[in-house]
């Protein structure tokens, strides 16, 4: 099915697909069981330009558009949700605030090595008391001479430990809620900044997620991103881009689950014929294919809106809501088509089933997307 992609976009899809099929697929299941961070894959992603696809060339990236980045994430997610999430947290969430609101000095120092894949980024917004209500940030930053002093903690942060650079939010005017939040850059190894142990999650085992702690952590004054007390809009913009990336993960993982269902249904024989010959099974797959294609069409449309500089918050919320719920449903149906072996770790589909669930939670839950959509409708 044509999505009217450019030659460059098709080319990048080809590179990503070849990498995913040849270097990820053969070991993804085995690596998932180890819970290890996939450094070798990340290094290859850096070499292939995947850690800076949509960052301009002058800042170390490939200089392609966000649609191309979505296509790369989609192809990688067909084989590994963990690696796709690592890239999402690094590029859409970590790099974008720097690109949109960073000073030239910050871009030179932090964005260029990130886009080249020399240093990974992480994005810390969520706190124990501030999840969906991200404006409830309790971490504080107080200016003391030429330094900001940060105190507090973050939780459920992706790429912890592996990342060298952390973009975080802190309250700089505690009485003002969303209007008193500022974004900062904190380097790994800064005294007073500690990274917690990775959480044991139900899926996405090769991606590290956990807590960050700040205890009188002093960072230079110039590590503030954008304007004082204007950090919230910077993060909301990052989340809109993140919703494109996470939807690309949803489309890719769902496609991976469908591919596996189609292959298995042609091989597995019951009642004297392949189960694909039973209309119940064939119709499941027809529904899965239709829903994936609908999500992909909306994904490419929203990415194009972003690339054209159009407002897309409303559409990104619809995309994220639909595609993440779709991915959970498609992975569930694929497991069903696999029967008993699907419920075992002998084959890969249980990994997709576990990994998919994060998509309806991270970067704004399904309920939060409905708040965004209905808020616009009823405004
Ligand atoms: C694997 C993983 C990786 C993550 N990576 C990152 C990261 O890199 N950076 C980062 O900052 N965060 C990250 N997160 C955090 C994630 O964004 C939050 O978990 C998410 O925003 C939900 O917040 P919460 O967990 O506190 O849930 P809560 O906000 O406590 O929500 C609990 C339930 O209540 C519902 N709810 C809350 N408020 C409302 C409302 N007003 N109306 C209706 N329903 C409501 C929610 O939809 C949900 O169903 C990650 C989380 C996970 C699990």
Image (cartoon, rainbow, N blue to C red):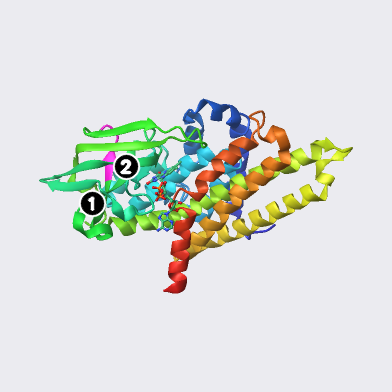
Position in image of residue 276 (x %, y %): 81, 44
Position in image of residue 183 (x %, y %): 28, 51
Residue at numbered disc 2: 154
Q: What is the CA distance from the residue labelled 1 to the residue labelled 2?
A: 13 Å
Position in image of residue 63 (x %, y %): 46, 51
Quick one: 333 or 38, which is closer to the camera? 333
Main SS type for the magenta part?
strand
Q: Which corner quadrant of the image does residue 148 belong to? A: top left
* Residues at circles 1 and 2 in contact by the CB criterion of under 8 Å: no
Task: Tell me: is circle 2 under 8 Å from ligand 1.
Answer: yes
Residue at 49% from the left image edge and 36% from the top image edge: 47
- Disc marking residue 171: 1
Residue at 25% from the left image edge and 53% from the top image edge: 182
**With respect to residue 281, does 32 lie above or below?**
above
Position of 85 with respect to 4 (left or right) is left
Q: Which residues are magenta?
A: 185-189
**With respect to residue 220, does 103 lie above or below?**
below
The secondary element bearing badge 1 is classed as strand
């Amino acid at each position: 099915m044509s999505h009217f992609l450019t030659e460059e976009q098709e080319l990048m899809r080809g590179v990503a697909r070849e990498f995913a099929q040849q270097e990820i697929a053969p070991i993804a299941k085995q690596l998932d069981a180890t819970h290890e961070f996939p450094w070798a894959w990340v290094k290859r992603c850096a070499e292939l330009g995947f850690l800076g696809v949509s960052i301009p060339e002058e800042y170390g990236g490939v200089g392609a558009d966000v649609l191309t980045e979505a296509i790369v994430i989609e192809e990688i997610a067909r084989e590994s949700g963990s690696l796709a999430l690592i890239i999402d947290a690094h590029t859409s969430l970590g790099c974008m605030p720097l690109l949109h609101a960073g000073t030239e000095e910050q871009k030179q120092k932090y964005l260029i090595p990130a886009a080249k894949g020399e240093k990974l980024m992480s994005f810390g917004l969520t706190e124990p008391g501030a999840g969906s209500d991200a404006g409830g940030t309790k971490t504080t930053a107080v200016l003391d001479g030429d330094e900001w002093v940060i105190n507090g903690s973050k939780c459920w942060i992706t790429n912890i430990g592996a990342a060298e650079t952390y973009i975080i939010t802190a309250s700089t005017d505690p009485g003002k809620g969303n209007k008193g939040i500022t974004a900062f850059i904190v380097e790994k190894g800064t005294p007073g900044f500690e990274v917690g142990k990775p959480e044991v999650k139900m899926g996405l085992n090769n991606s590290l997620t956990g807590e960050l702690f700040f205890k009188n952590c002093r960072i230079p004054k110039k590590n503030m991103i954008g304007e004082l007390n204007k950090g919230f809009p910077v993060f909301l913009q990052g989340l809109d881009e993140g919703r494109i990336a996470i939807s690309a993960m949803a489309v890719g993982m769902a496609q991976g689950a469908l591919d596996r269902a189609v292959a298995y249904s042609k091989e597995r024989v019951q009642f004297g014929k392949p189960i694909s010959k039973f209309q119940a099974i064939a119709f499941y797959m027809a529904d899965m294919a239709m829903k994936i294609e609908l999500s992909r069409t909306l994904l490419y449309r929203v990415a194009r809106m972003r690339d054209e500089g159009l407002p897309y918050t409303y559409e990104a919320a619809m995309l994220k809501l639909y595609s993440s719920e779709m991915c959970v449903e498609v992975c569930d149906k694929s497991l069903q088509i696999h029967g008993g072996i699907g419920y075992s770790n002998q084959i890969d589909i249980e990994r997709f089933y576990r990994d998919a669930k994060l998509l309806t939670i991270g970067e704004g839950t399904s309920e939060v997307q409905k708040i965004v959509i209905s808020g616009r409708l009823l405004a």
